[in-house]
Amino acid sequence: MEFGLALALLGAALATFLPGMGSAKGVGLVGKAASGVIAEDPSKFGQTLLLQALPATQGIYGLLIAFLVLLKVGMVGGDGAVEVSLLTGVYILLACLPIAVVGYFSAFHQGSVAAAGVGVVAKRPEEVSKAMIYAAMVETYAVLALLVSFLMLNGVSL
């Protein structure tokens, strides 16, 4: 395997596991908070589950970029890997970094905000939508990073 392809695959790996780790941390934070709430009032399960699902999206965004990289280099849906120059491999790696880094941090912080939102649901369940809006604001930056990674990756030609 040439070094350019290895760099492209490293980008795909980073885009997968960094946002995935952030999402796992975020979902875990909310799950802990939600478990305490539903121990007292099981009827709040649906509301807390909505909040818990929010930090999971960054992992999906990273997976999407990784899948696009794999398509671009021919590892998925092609006749095998194509030749990737060293410079092109660097470009692909760099294109993966926005979602990799921002996805990790935004998922973790979104989990913290959503966990606080679970506290809102515990006391005022009718305000769940406000708690979701606070958590969704953090996601804005993951969406922007996804867009930048997508545009950068589409700008790389093999």
Image (cartoon, helix red, strand yellow):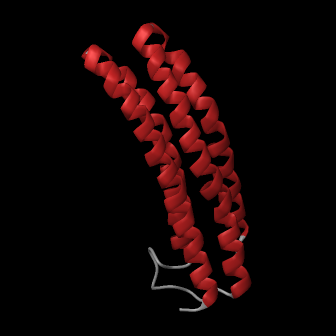
Please state which of residues 107 and 62 is positioned toward the viewer in this rendering: 107
- Is 82 placed left or right of 115 in the picture? right
Q: Position of residue 143 (x, y in %)?
A: 63, 44
Q: Position of residue 82 (x, y in %)?
A: 56, 86
- Is 4 placed left or right of 77 in the picture? right
Q: Position of residue 61 (x, y in %)?
A: 54, 51
- Is 50 placed left or right of 137 in the picture? left
Please state which of residues 34 and 147 is positioned toward the viewer in this rendering: 34
Which quadrant of the figure contains the C terminus? bottom right
Query: Residue 59, relative to residue 6: is it above or below?
Result: above
Q: Residue drawn 60% across and 24% down?
A: 134
- Dividing the picture into quadrants, the one containing residue 28 is top left
Q: Position of residue 7 (x, y in %)?
A: 62, 79
Q: Residue drawn 53% across and 64% down?
A: 66
Q: Residue drawn 71% across and 54% down?
A: 148
Q: Residue furthest bottom?
A: 1
Query: Residue 61, relative to residue 33: is it above or below?
Result: below
Q: Residue drawn 72% across and 73% down?
A: 91
- Dividing the picture into quadrants, the one containing residue 87 is bottom right
- Dividing the picture into quadrants, the one containing residue 153 is bottom right
- Is 80 placed left or right of 158 in the picture? left
Please state which of residues 112 and 86 is positioned toward the viewer in this rendering: 112
Count every numbered label the image shows and give the total.
0
Res 68 seen here: no
Res 105 seen here: yes
Query: Residue 85, relative to residue 102: is it above or below?
Result: below
